Amino acid sequence: MKVLSFSYCFPNHENPTWGIFVYQRLAALARQTELKVCSPVPWFPMVTGAQSEENEQCWKDVSVFRPRFFYIPKFFKNFDGRLYASGLRRWLESLQKSWQPDLLDAHFVWPDGVGVALLAQKFNIPYVITLRGKLYECLKDDSQTQQCRRALQGARAVISVSSRMAAEAVRLGADDQRLAVIPNGVDLKHFRIRDRQQCREKLNLPTTGRLLVTVAHLGHRKGHHEVIEALAALPDDVRLIIVGGDAQGGSKEQLMNVAKRHGVDDRLILPGRQGYDLIPYFYSAADLSVLASYREGCPNAVLESLACGTPAVATDVGAVPDILPQPECGGIVPPQQVDPLKQALSAALEKTWSSQQVRSASGVRSWDQVADEVNKVFEKVLSP
């Protein structure tokens, strides 16, 4: 079986952690089947760079192509899927002269899924779409919704990272007999239980008191404002670490101003974006992780925390109900509501947790296990 996977979100030299969860699933899948990746580069004259490469490269252990496609920044976004397909048509035609894929594998419904659906129709190749949080953005626009609907209805299989999005796909017309719910996995060797005090010392964090940690960019939709407000109601020995870089709608300065308004600026730690190699140490240094997002697909921040044996409190979005057993591993609260968040954090901080029991009860799976499930979906699609 030859699989050609498409993902606009895939690591590159400028941002090696961009789409790391996509890479991890594909790297595991490549150990089970013959696979190549197309990570298209959007391009517009004199605005975006031409950092593309149509020749086959290797990103760690995955074969990658990065052909560019024309798009218009900020405008006419409803055409992105069609421009994606138009820009890649000639490249795919050329690739097939030396390597003929049996299956096209789109990692987001937009623009990958919509673009791949058009390519699949052109070249008569079956395709599969994976649903992640991007779907919810598309549902805000009628044109994008209709394009996603057609792509999902034409897919030979749909993989959803959450049961909630799977139900949304069925509402849009996807065949429920061709639908599989497969949440993300975790690098279980990288994210593992470590000594809390040693991790705090390694990261130069306070060695006394209790620590909450959030690993997410500083954008508004991650719910940091609510967590900071909740922090003000917790005991003075509790500090909050937010690991992440500035993003649209949020910056260090803005969050520190929020903390000052609530009188907890001396209890907020903002180390900025950190390397992937350090992230497990932040989880292990903390007593509890928190993710107060307004929207998610399958948040790896929750999975990785549990793999480190650190309980989590997260909002009821995306795959959170699928991946966070409660009360064994933490709690789930409504998004954008401070009072339930305060109560859940307070209760979780007062409880004595066993790291081993949290990891065991979480049921987190390796990427190899996830890839095995995905591979079975592909085999079913291609079976006579």
Image: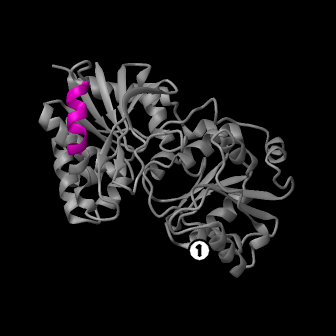
- The x and y percentages for residue 331 are 58, 56
Number of marks: 1
Q: Picture quarter containing residue 46?
A: bottom left
Can I make out residue 285 in this image? Answer: yes
Dot 1: within a 10 Å radius of its alpha carbon, few (fewer than 14), some, or many (20 or more) residues?
A: some
Residue occupying image coordinates x 32% and y 25%: 376
Residue occupying image coordinates x 69% and y 65%: 346
Mark 1, secondary structure of its residue = helix
Q: Picture quarter containing residue 341?
A: bottom right
- From the viewer's side, name the closer residue of 350 and 114: 114
Q: Left or right: where does residue 37 sit relative to residue 344?
A: left
Q: Name above or below for residue 356 compared with residue 226.
A: above
Q: Name above or below for residue 302 compared with residue 383.
A: below
Q: Picture quarter containing residue 36?
A: top left
Callout 1, which amino acid?
A: Asp
Can I make out residue 178 in this image? Answer: no
Q: Name above or below for residue 250 compared with residue 33.
A: below
Magenta region, main secondary structure: helix
Residue occupying image coordinates x 34% and y 60%: 73
Residue 377 falls within the magenta-colored stretch = no
**Screen quadrant of the C terminus:** top left
- Name the residue that disc number 1 marks: 339
- The x and y percentages for residue 277 are 66, 38
Q: Left or right: where does residue 382 sit relative to residue 274?
A: left
- The x and y percentages for residue 2 are 29, 21
Q: Left or right: where does residue 277 sit relative to residue 184?
A: right
- From the viewer's side, name the closer residue of 167 and 261: 261
Q: Left or right: where does residue 98 sit relative to residue 317?
A: left
| Residue reaching furthest to the front | 46
- From the viewer's side, name the closer residue of 273 and 47: 47
- The x and y percentages for residue 33 are 36, 19
Magenta-drawn segment: 85-95
